[in-house]
Image (cartoon, rainbow, N blue to C red):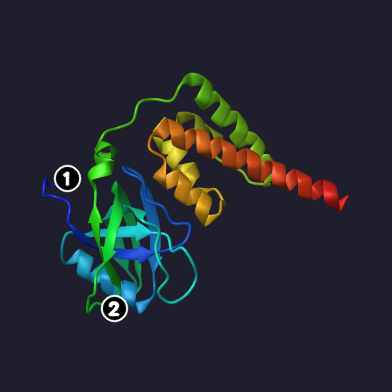
Amino acid sequence: MTEDDDPLPESIPVFPLTGALVFPRGTLPLHIFEPRYRAMIRDALGGHRLIGMAQPRADGERPPLYDIGGLGRISQFSETPDGRFLISLTGICRFRIRTELTVATPYRQVAVDYDEFLSDALEPPALAPAVRAAMESELKDYLDAKNLSADWAAVIDADDEGLINTLSCVCPFSAVEKQALLEAATLAERADALLAFMRFDRAADDDSETRLQ
C-alpha cells in the first residue's frame, strides 16, 4: 500500500539506470536531465508520484531490464531554470516486472506484481550482533583498500537496515552484484552477500597489486 492507503499501481513508469537501487524506507537522490525522463517526472508529479527503478541488462537505447526493481515515491524535488529535476525517491517496496507495456509516452512503462515482496512493508529483524560487528570490521578494511573514507560516527549510529542498504547502493559493485543485493530475500541474506562482495573486491585489488610488484 502507498502512504495514503491507496493500492499500489499495477503499471508504473520505469527509469532504467545501471547501479541505481531504491530499497524500502531508503532514499535515492537523482538528477534528471534527459527530456524523456523529465517528462516522466512531470507526469509522476501530476499523479501518484511513483516511479520504478530497474537496472538494464545491457547497453543500448532500449535494453532489456532485470525482472526485479524498486518502487519509490518522489518525496522531494526541485526544478532548475532549464527544466532539469533534482529529486529524492523514498523506497516503498520491490516489484517483479510482468511485461513491458506499449505506450505513447517517451519513457517506458511496465506492468508489475508486488505479491512476493509484501514483507517489504515491515521493518526487518535486527542483524545478529556478530554479523553487525563483522560488517563494520570489513567495511573499515574495504574503505582502506579503496582509499575511501566514511563518517564513522554515522556508520556506528546507523540502524542495520539503513547501513546495509546504503552500502548496497554506494559501494562500487557490478550491476550483477547490485542486482543480487536488491533481490536478497531478507536483510540478513543481503548482509551476507554484501560481506562476500566486499571481501571479494578487496581480495581482487590485493591480487592485482601483487601482480604489479
* Crowd rating for badge 1 (residues with CA inside 10 Å; few <14, some 14–19, many 20+): few
| Residue 150, image x, y percentages | 57, 41
The picture places residue 119, in percent across and down from the top left corner, at 27, 36
Considering only vertical position in the picture, is 95 above or below 127? below
What residue is pinned by disc 1? 1
Locate residue 108 relative to residue 45 in the image: left or right: right
- Which amino acid type is shown beneath numbered disc 1? Met
Which quadrant of the figure has residue 134? top right
Residue type, numbered disc 2 = Pro
Residue 97 sits above or below residue 108 on the image? above
Callout 2: SS: loop
Q: State whether residue 16 appears in this view.
A: yes
Pointer 2 residue: 106
Give percent across and percent down for residue 84: 35, 73
Q: Classify residue 206 as left or right of residue 139.
A: right
What is the residue that sits farthest to the right in this orientation? 213
